[in-house]
Image (cartoon, rainbow, N blue to C red):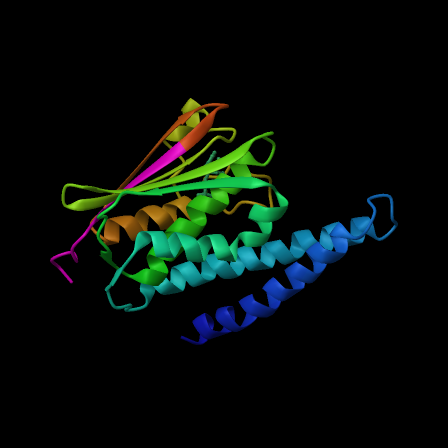
């Protein structure tokens, strides 16, 4: 509990520092002598925030959180709000389709929010160098489940890596950027909810992650 409250307490000021740094970067020419310093400060601040997020995810997985009936669309709205600065400044087009009549799902809200946050953060990283940057969310009922699909038109996943991406510590990101923990946490959370997750990708053209979440609470709960 102490670690969780520390991580929460630190996350908010870190986000403010990040916003200030991003503001100053925007108003500093890239030939200014301070530009490199700001760039380093921004990079280190992002590292701290990533670390705090991973810590929070681990903590939430261990904490006895109650199941609540919640709308997946609402959780994505929260995630897009958290990532609004990146989405706006990087010019990301977000498309969201929620089928009419999609029911709310019994879930541990903090856990599932972390799942969506990790998937969208990965998608943002993947589309970074594309001219048209697009992330699409599809939510619809599928039998006893709600199906959630997150697709992007980013650099995709090499066929030889597709079988490894859910392994802990597997990352293709440069040292200091990726921990390789995001998707293994995502998979654990989905399995704990009695759900399933799969991924497919056309290398160079984009990736798609598909989640099936049971509408009802797992029987063991
Ligand atoms: P990290 O983001 O720290 O590398 P993850 O477990 O979240 O850790 O992801 C593992 C790897 O899976 C990434 O390094 C990347 O190679 C690949 N990956 C995940 N999501 C995507 C995506 N949307 N597009 C392309 N590659 C992805």
Is residue 181 in view? no
Residue 102: x percent and y percent? 23, 48
Q: Which range is magenta? A: 208-221
Looking at the image, residue 52 lies above or below residue 89: below
Indicate the quadrant containing the N terminus: top left, top right, bottom left or bottom right. Answer: bottom left
In the foreground, 109 or 157: 109
Looking at the image, residue 132 lies above or below residue 11: above
Looking at the image, residue 192 lies above or below residue 98: below
In the foreground, 37 or 23: 23
| In this picture, residue 107 sits left or right of residue 221 | right
The number of numbered discs placed on residues in the rendered structure image is 0
| In this picture, residue 172 sits left or right of residue 162 | right
Q: What's the residue at 50%, 23% (across, down)?
A: 204
Q: What's the residue at 66%, 64% (across, down)?
A: 17
Q: Residue furthest left?
A: 219
Indicate the quadrant containing the C terminus: top left, top right, bottom left or bottom right. Answer: bottom left
Residue 12: x percent and y percent? 56, 68
Residue 200: x percent and y percent? 36, 29
Looking at the image, residue 183 lies above or below residue 219: above
């Amino acid at each position: 509990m102490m670690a969780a409250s520390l991580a929460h307490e630190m996350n908010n000021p870190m986000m403010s520092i990040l916003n200030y740094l991003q503001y100053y970067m925007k108003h500093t020419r890239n030939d200014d002598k301070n530009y490199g310093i700001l760039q380093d400060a921004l990079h280190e601040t992002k590292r701290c925030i990533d670390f705090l997020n991973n810590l929070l995810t681990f903590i939430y997985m261990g904490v006895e959180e109650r199941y609540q009936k919640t709308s997946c669309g609402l959780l994505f709205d929260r995630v897009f709000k958290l990532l609004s600065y990146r989405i706006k400044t990087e010019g990301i087009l977000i498309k969201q389709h929620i089928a009419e009549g999609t029911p709310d799902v019994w879930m541990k809200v903090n856990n599932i929010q972390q799942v969506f946050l990790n998937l969208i953060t990965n998608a943002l990283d993947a589309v970074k160098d594309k001219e048209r940057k697009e992330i699409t969310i599809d939510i619809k009922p599928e039998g006893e489940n709600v199906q959630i699909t997150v697709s992007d038109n980013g650099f995709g996943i090499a066929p030889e890596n597709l079988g490894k991406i859910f392994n802990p510590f597997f990352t293709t990101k440069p040292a200091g950027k990726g921990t390789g923990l995001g998707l293994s946490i995502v998979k654990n959370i989905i399995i704990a909810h009695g759900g399933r997750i799969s991924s497919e990708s056309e290398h160079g053209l984009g990736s798609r992650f598909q989640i099936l979440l049971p509408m009802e609470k797992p029987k063991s709960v």
